[in-house]
Structures are given as C-alpha cells and as structure tokens.
Image (tube, rainbow, N blue to C red):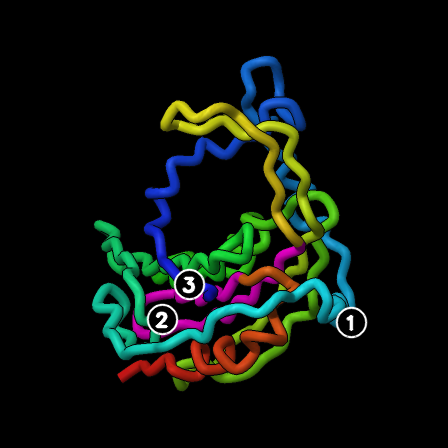
C-alpha cells in the first residue's frame, strides 16, 4: 500500500547542502549572480516523461479551508498544512505531501504580499538546466493572472548532512515541474505554486487543475 503523509516545511531535519558537490571550503553554496537568475531557456512544451518512470501512487483527498492572511478560500489536501502571517500584511501558506514511493513531495505554496511576483518564483528555481515556459494570461481566483511553468532536471547530490546526527549519505532529486499563477487581490500580490516530480504530473493532472480552480476571492 502506498501511504501519503505531510510534513511541515521546517520539520524534515535536513540540512540540505551538497557537501561535496558544490560550494566553497565552508560547505556554503556560492551566491548566484543576479544576472544569471533569469538566464533560463524558454521551451514551447513541457518535457515528455515515460510512464515507466511513474510508479503507482496514492489518491489525494481534499478539503476546503480559508487562507485568512490573504482572504482567499481554497482546497488543500486533507493533511496538515501551515500558514504564517507577515507583519506588513499578507502571509504564506504551505503544504508538502510525501508519497512513500517518491523521493520528493508534491508541494502547495501561496505567497501573498506587496511585491510578490513571478520574478521571485523564477529566482527561486534558477539553477543550471532549468527551462521555462512562455507566460500565459488567464484568470485565477476571479482575477486577471499570469501562468508560468519551470522544468528542472534531476539533481544528484554527493553528500547530504543531517541535523539529527545521522550519517551523511548521497541524495537525489528527480526532475521537477514548478507551476505558478500570479495575480493581485485587494492590496496584495499573490503567487500560487504547485510543485511536483515531473514523472507524476500526468498522474496528478486533475488534482493540479482542482487546486488552482478552487481558489476563490470573496
């Protein structure tokens, strides 16, 4: 049986840095060049992944919540999620859904605040080899929106150190797809994200659509 579980963003106990793969002698990754953050290759279509790479996985169940920090109603997976309010207004909602047969979770993330943007989203995922779709215009939460997708290649990590004292070990991140829709609601800029291993995207395509379609701005 495949089980689904959700962990808060800060609860994984991973100090996830590649101790041999990158960085200087202190183990810190070098600061990226801001100009390189936006040097992403644009592609016309998402990558094609064989069904062989997508093993059976659990069905997701959903329930309705209110993201009070942004005044938005939406559906999230029927597992724990977290929210945090920002002093200047708005806040963040996050949820990670770990599947027992997958090395990386499905993640839901909403950031709502002045200045939140797709540029910020691109900077968060501007690693080598990441490709970007064209920006598409549409409607999200009843508001004019922009839709952007990023496609990241697999990452093989030579060494991961754990904060709980476990021995270090190699790590692996499969190819990932990051989907974002950005819009403005009231005084807040909002970016809604859906992040998923690329091999699982078709398996959970209906859930992805449900998540974005569920957003309601009363």
CA separation in Å, label 2 and label 3? 13 Å
Residue 89: % across, % down: 25, 57
107 sits to left or right of 128: left
CA separation in Å, label 3 and label 1? 35 Å
Lower sequence index among marks 2 and 3: 3
User: Between 158 and 67, which is closer to the camera in this rendering?
Assistant: 158
Lower sequence index among marks 2 and 1: 1
Residue drawn where x is 34% and y is 77% of the image: 62
Mark 2 or 1, closer to the camera: 2
Quarter of the image that includes the C terminus:
bottom left
Task: For mark 2, give the secondary structure.
Answer: strand
Dominant secondary-structure state across the stretch colored magenta = strand
Residue drawn where x is 31% and y is 81% of the image: 217
CA separation in Å, label 2 and label 1? 30 Å
| Residue tagged 3 | 3
Task: For mark 3, give the secondary structure.
Answer: loop
Mark 2 Cα shell of 10 Å, populated few (<14), some (14-19), many (≥20): some
Residue drawn where x is 37% and y is 79% of the image: 215
120 sits to left or right of 4: right
Farthest front residue in view: 1
| Residue tagged 1 | 44
87 sits to left or right of 115: left
As drawn, the label of residue 77 is: 2
Mark 3 or 1, closer to the camera: 3
215 sits to left or right of 158: left
Instruction: Give the magenta part as a residue range.
Output: 175-195
The quarter of the displayed image where residue 12 is located: top left
Question: Can residue 184 be seen?
Answer: yes
Residue 73, placed above or below residue 120: below
Q: Marks 2 and 1: CB-CB under 8 Å?
A: no
User: Between 112 and 207, which is closer to the camera in this rendering?
Assistant: 207
Residue 173: % across, % down: 61, 47
């Amino acid at each position: 049986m495949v089980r689904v579980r959700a962990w808060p963003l800060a609860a994984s106990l991973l100090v996830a840095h590649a101790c041999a793969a990158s960085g200087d002698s202190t183990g810190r990754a070098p600061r990226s060049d801001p100009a390189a953050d936006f040097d992403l290759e644009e592609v016309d279509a998402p990558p094609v992944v064989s069904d062989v790479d997508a093993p059976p996985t659990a069905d997701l169940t959903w329930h309705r919540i209110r993201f009070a920090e942004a005044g938005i109603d939406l559906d999230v997976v029927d597992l724990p999620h977290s929210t945090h309010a920002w002093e200047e207004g708005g806040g963040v909602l996050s949820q990670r859904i770990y599947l027992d047969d997958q090395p990386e979770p499905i993640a839901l993330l909403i950031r709502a605040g002045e200045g939140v943007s797709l540029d910020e989203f691109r900077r968060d995922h501007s690693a080598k080899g990441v490709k970007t779709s064209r920006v598409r215009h549409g409607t999200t939460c009843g508001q004019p929106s922009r839709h952007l997708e990023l496609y990241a290649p697999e990452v093989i990590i030579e060494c991961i150190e754990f904060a709980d004292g476990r021995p270090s070990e190699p790590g692996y991140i499969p190819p990932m797809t990051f989907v974002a829709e950005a819009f403005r609601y009231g005084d807040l800029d909002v970016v809604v994200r859906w992040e998923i291993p690329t091999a699982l995207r078709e398996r959970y395509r209906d859930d992805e659509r449900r998540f974005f379609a569920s957003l309601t701005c009363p």
